[in-house]
Image (cartoon, helix red, strand yellow):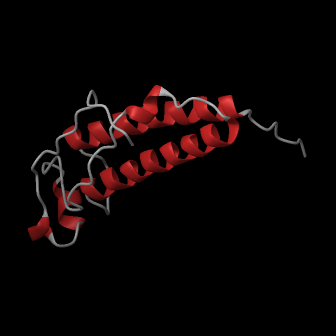
Amino acid sequence: MKKRKELSPEEKIKSLRADIIREIDHWEYINAYGCNDPFWPDGTNMNLTRNHIIHDKRQIAEICTENSLPLPEEMYLPIPPKVNEYYMANLKQKKRVERIRNEWKITTKKNQYDRQQLSLF
């Protein structure tokens, strides 16, 4: 079996930076259009995506601290807000909405997020 090459701290950070941007894009997409998860509301998936961003930022902070590297600009992007678990962006997905338990809890109020607002993590 081939041994996998260990990534340098800079390579790890580069990958995590790209992941943060991808996850923020994904969160914004779900907020606007919803997703296709057959069993979980959009809000649950948005909060999971939010947790991925938090995890990536923690990993970057750890790598930067251990290797005396400066924090990349993605660290200053705001973390999307935690949203109502029962948020649904698109109620036109009738079968999906019917499968989700507690239909009476479903909300469609859009969630606010400003990517341009700087954050201190």
- The relative height of residue 43 versus residue 56 in the rendered view (above or below) is below
Residue at the spot x=18%, y=53% of the render? 88
Along the line of sight, the residue nearer the viewer: 36 or 48: 48
Relative placement, left or right, of 39 versus 100 is right
| Residue for point 60% across, 33% down | 13
Q: In the displayed orientation, state which residue is furthest to the right.
A: 1
Residue occupying image coordinates x 20% and y 38% = 32
Tell me residue 59's x, y (percent): 57, 46
Foreground pick, 3 / 69: 69
Report whether 35 appears left or right of 108: right
Q: Position of residue 57 (x, y in %)?
A: 49, 43
Q: Is residue 104 above or below residue 107?
A: below
Q: Position of residue 48 (x, y in %)?
A: 38, 55
The one nearer the camera, 107 or 57, is: 57
Q: Visible in this render: residue 91? A: yes
Left or right of 93? Residue 38 is right
Q: Is residue 78 above or below residue 1?
A: above
